[in-house]
């Protein structure tokens, strides 16, 4: 029992160290300059906020069986609040689905101090800084990929990976390819609610539309569609 708790403490500490490294990262000058400028100028609705304005670390349960991978922090969402998918419409849509499927303690995600906890899930992203027009460059994604790789190594209980959007899917698959776990990314085309089993011993992979306002406001992604993704993830993780 002592060994178990020692291992759990080491895992939590390792993620904490990694997250501190993410927050202090300066690898992408364009993204860092943009995040700082957004934090300086602010949006009128958030003038009384002190924006985070730094790379955003992962968030959730260190013993998670389900890992969510998004695209990048929103300029006035996670770049403002400092927590993944927190403070914008994408986060509202996502956390409601996570709450309804038992992964989140509450349906709203407003700030780092709102008491929200994740149970059995961990949220990360392909890029950790808010990019202009939500479009990180290929080079910026490549520089940031090492952080996701380390999370994959530390989150040893993950049984299901949910890729929110095509960029998240391709980033994750590129890691599997470069590690020799899969031969080609072409065997895993993006499509909503597609379930893949990349190789024996690897987590099941589910692709999903990203809960961006563009997708949710047009009906491309409905609340029921996203909830079904996490119902599947929960079943497969068990």
Image (spheres, rainbow, N blue to C red):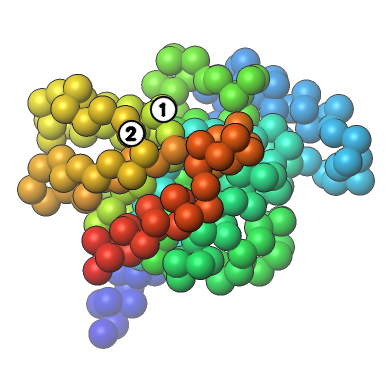
Residue with the mark numbered 1: 167
Crowd tier of the residue under label 1, counting other residues whose Cα lies within 10 Å: few below 14, some 14–19, many 20 or above: many
Task: State how far apart marks 1 and 2 are (Cα).
Answer: 12 Å
Question: Where is the N terminus found, in terms of image quarters?
Answer: bottom left
Q: Nearer the viewer, residue 223 or 235?
A: 223
Q: Position of residue 110 (x, y in %)?
A: 71, 56
Q: Is residue 161 above or below residue 39?
A: below
Residue with the mark numbered 2: 191
- Extreme residue toward the bottom, this view: 1
Q: Residue at position x 56%, y 71% from top?
A: 105
Q: Residue at position x 24%, y 61% from top?
A: 236
Q: Nearer the viewer, residue 197 or 55?
A: 197
Q: Is residue 205 above or below residue 105?
A: above
233 lies left or right of 39 = left
| Rendering quarter of residue 218 | top right
Dot 2 lies on which element? Answer: loop
Q: Earlier in the sequence, mark 1 or mark 2?
A: 1
Number of marks drawn: 2
Crowd tier of the residue under label 2, counting other residues whose Cα lies within 10 Å: few below 14, some 14–19, many 20 or above: some
- The answer to whether residue 10 is visible is no
- Extreme residue toward the left, this view: 200
* Numbered disc in front, either 1 or 2: 2
Q: Position of residue 91 (x, y in %)?
A: 61, 49
């Amino acid at each position: 029992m002592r060994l178990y708790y020692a291992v759990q403490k080491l895992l939590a500490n390792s993620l904490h160290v990694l997250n501190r490294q993410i927050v202090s990262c300066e690898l992408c000058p364009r993204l860092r300059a943009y995040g700082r400028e957004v934090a300086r100028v602010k949006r009128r609705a958030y003038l009384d906020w002190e924006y985070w304005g730094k790379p955003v670390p992962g968030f959730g349960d260190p013993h998670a069986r389900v890992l969510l991978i998004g695209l990048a922090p929103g300029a006035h969402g996670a770049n403002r609040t400092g927590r993944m998918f927190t403070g914008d419409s994408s986060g509202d849509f996502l956390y409601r689905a996570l709450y309804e499927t038992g992964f989140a303690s509450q349906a709203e995600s407003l700030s780092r101090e709102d008491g929200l906890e994740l149970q059995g899930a961990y949220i990360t992203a392909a890029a950790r800084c808010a990019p202009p027009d939500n479009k990180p460059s290929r080079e910026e994604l490549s520089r940031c990929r090492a952080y996701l790789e380390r999370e994959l190594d530390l989150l040893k209980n993950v049984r299901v990976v949910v890729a929110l959007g095509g960029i998240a899917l391709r980033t994750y698959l590129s890691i599997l390819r470069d590690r020799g776990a899969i031969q080609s990314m072409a065997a895993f085309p993006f499509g909503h609610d597609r379930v893949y089993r990349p190789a024996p011993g690897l987590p099941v992979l589910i692709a999903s539309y990203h809960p961006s306002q563009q997708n949710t406001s047009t009906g491309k992604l409905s609340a029921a569609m996203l909830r079904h993704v996490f119902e599947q993830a929960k079943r497969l993780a068990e």
